[in-house]
Amino acid sequence: MAGMFSDIPRGTVRILDPGAGVGTLSAAVCERVLRQESPRRLVFELWENDPRLIPLLERTMSRCRDSLRDSGHEMEFVVRIDDFVLANARKSLFETGPHSSFHLTILNPPYFKLRKESPHARAMGHVVHGQPNIYALFMAAAADLLLPGGEMVAITPRSYFNGPYFKRFRKWFFDRMTARHVHVFESRTEAFKGRAVLQENVILHAEKGGEPSDVVLTTSFGRDLVDLENSAVAYEKIIDNSSGDHVVRVSTSRLEHEIIEVMDRLPQRFRSLGFEISTGPVVTFRSTEFLRHERSSDTAPLLWMHNVRPFVTRFPSKNGKPAHIEISPASKKLLVPAQTYVLLKRFTAKEEKRRLVAGIMNAGDSYSEWVGLENHLNYIYRKGSDLTRTEAFGLAAFFNSALVDRYFRAISGNTQVNATEIRGLPLPDEETLIRIGAEIEQTESRDPRTVEEVVGRALRLPRHFIDELIEVAQ
Ligand SMILES: C[S@@+](CC[C@H](N)C(=O)[O-])C[C@H]1O[C@@H](n2cnc3c(N)ncnc32)[C@H](O)[C@@H]1O
């Protein structure tokens, strides 16, 4: 991380380390400077609110200072035993910010969710909304404290790269900071046969202000930084501002890069074809009085995530959860008419191969004219009319393809599938979607290979590309 700063210039360099712990990152910056021949003058400001760590932090920094001095450099540091966010938050967007005075900031902030009413969230309301994660507040406050042209290197979860929860933060942050280098840690697991991967942590190197130019993208596998893949990618390919909220998209392999290219060229968006997506209205713990284990004349089926399999809905469930929901005036708002829906799971376990799993529900799958959809499902429908079966097959095949699954992973670090992200997804034109649907509807086997084959051919993808997707899909 210390090596990612473009330069440690001569003259006084002021460095901020928020959430410094025992000073590991600042020590790494000192180590980098130690290797420099011409003298440097470093002034560190380290923030740490855990008093137990302070003696260790001071010891680290004193040793660094001694070593630097021995090698002809100068170094001073100050440790602030205080809450970095509360002490530096701007009260409102319009109030003058804190005094920006740092050339560099290096951070590995704490990661945890805050309540919206927490003092931290309130103090930084201009940057985040909803239930923020403290790391975003650290990044924002640190960005505020940088001088124009100042640089940040931050290791964090990658959840801020996309999705509605971090939208305000992303906009705020990338309106001020220009990304220069993104590093993605990928963790492979055996279950993925070494091909499909999950991405969790990222390092961002960004400059305050500055002109966008190519972004360096590196990837390493697991904790091992040796196996590094490296490429330079056009700024707008990584920071996609087409929807105005700076979604960070990282394609970490040639295949993923091609997937993004193909998807970006698709002519339609989910919404423009008249599809709607909503989240299942039944929040079970708030609706216990309506849930039933037995079917009766005044119940409708209640569908959960486990009822949804690729292309089908399997009912009833066998796992002991209530499989029915009462139909009454009080429960009506929780029910939707039994018609054709594509059901998308909202969550998949991190280890699961697929982020997107789309089943189809037909009117006949429900014994009632109503159906209850549990809140961990998203359902796709058309406003004012019913989805045709062929359309439903087309959509489900598209969502169940490795092409879309891998695209979704590249744009989304969340394991959650949010309706907002689906609304922004590229789609083929209606005719192509129907063609995919018609073909899949007629096939007996809707296994991953067939789905990839049908979707790939309908989109006129090159043969080698379809073959690669088939390999990933299985
Ligand atoms: C993930 S650790 C990183 C420590 C160090 N930077 C490193 O990389 O080894 C985050 C540190 O931030 C500190 N911290 C948490 N909340 C803080 C706050 N509001 N203000 C200042 N420090 C905080 C924690 O005590 C912890 O030492």
Image: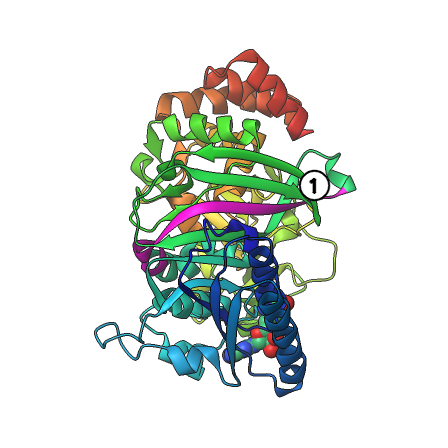
The quadrant the N terminus occupies is bottom right
81 to 345, vertically: above or below? below
92 vs 384: above or below: below
Q: Amino acid at mark 1?
A: Val
Classify mark 1: residues with Cα within 10 Å, few (<14), some (14-19) or many (20+): few
Which portion, as a residue range, is magenta? 172-189
What residue is shown with label 1? 226
Q: What is the x, y in percent for residue 381?
A: 41, 43
Q: Identify which residue is drawn at 76% across, 40% down.
A: 191
Q: Main secondary structure of the magenta part?
A: strand
Is 184 inside the magenta-drawn segment?
yes
Q: Is residue 436 left or right of residue 289?
A: left
Query: Residue at coordinates 39% horizontally, 30% vertically from top-left?
Result: 264
Query: Which quadrant, please, contains the C terminus?
Result: top right
Q: Residue at x 40, y 48 (%)?
A: 179
Colouring method of the image: rainbow
In percent of width and height, residue 193 lies at 75, 34
Q: Nearer the viewer, residue 110 or 468?
A: 110
Q: Is residue 224 above or below residue 123?
A: above
* Residue 139 part of the magenta segment: no
In this view of the protein, can residue 1 be seen by the observer?
A: no
